[in-house]
Amino acid sequence: MQTVDKAFELLSLFTTWQVQLGLSDIARQSKFDKATARRLLLSLAKHGFIEQDIKSRRYRIGPGVLRLAKLREASVPLDAIVQPILKQLTDDTGETAHFALLAGGTVSTVAVSECSKSNRVSMALGESLPMHATATGLSILSYFDQAARNAIAANFSSKFTPHTPTDDAEISALLKYGRSNGFVVNRGFYEADVCSIASPIFNPSCQPLGAIAVATPISRFTASLEENIRVSVITAAAEITSQVGGQYPEKRIA
């Protein structure tokens, strides 16, 4: 493995639920010896991609990454990528499409394309949605490892409708299905009269950064519409992932 590959592998260890890591953690997770890991970290720190907390001695992403992220956003803004795809999703399915970003233990709606039907699902921009009760949240959660799931598992007890999954076995089954198939179906989990299908979006480190979904009143959620939404959402998720420079995990089955 080339040095550059090794360095980027270290950067990929940092996630929204693992924002700081000690040298031992980095060596263990990367399977590099401590001397190699430290040498790579020093090189990354030299260019501002990694920095070390003076008190804890733990490492975190440095400002160099933020600079590149701002350059990427300036050249290809996420909103400019997402909005046309959401509009196309609405045109293809006749239903409301939305995009949510991962933020700690919740997902937040950041873009919406509502359909013109009088009976439609409306989404509020900035609304935080529970991970275990929404298709967007579950589709993202499908790609969390067990430690990351455990870190936010206390939030999975909230019941929003009689159909909200709160049982460990039920949630695990949904996550396994989501990882195996690349999408999750929400049948009245958050709002009893709303169904939705979501597929995750990935960043260049193969980590989920958000999800795209289509939501419809349960009264219109026929088998034919479900199939149309499923195919359209998976296609849209792949397109956004590609345009943001993301990569799908090699192993998509848990």
Image (spheres, rainbow, N blue to C red):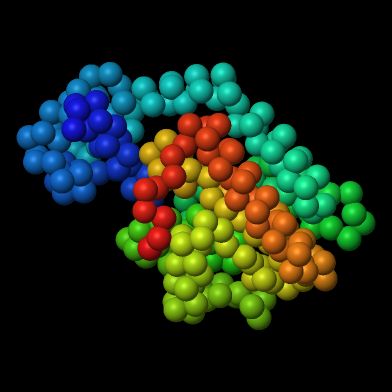
The quarter of the picture where the N terminus appears is: top left
Q: Which is more toward the observer, 70 or 117?
A: 117
**Between residues 223 and 151, which one lies in front from this camera angle?**
223
* Vertical comparison of 7 with 191: above or below: above
Q: Position of residue 21 (x, y in %)?
A: 25, 44
Name the residue rendered at 90%, 54% in the picture.
Answer: 117
Quarter of the image where one finds residue 26: top left
Residue 2 lies, in percent from the top left, at: 19, 28
Q: Residue at x 58, y 38 (%)?
A: 240
The mark total stands at: 0
In the image, taking residue 254 as reference, residue 246 lies left or right, namely right
Q: Is 171 situated above or below 252?
A: below
* Residue 207, image x, y percentages: 42, 45
Query: Would residue 45 appear left or right of 123 to someone viewing this image?
Result: left
Q: Quadrant of residue 51?
A: top left
Residue at image position (51%, 23%) is 72
| Residue at the right extreme, as displayed | 118
Residue 109 x/y as whole percent: 65, 48
- Decide if residue 37 is on the left or right side of residue 203: left
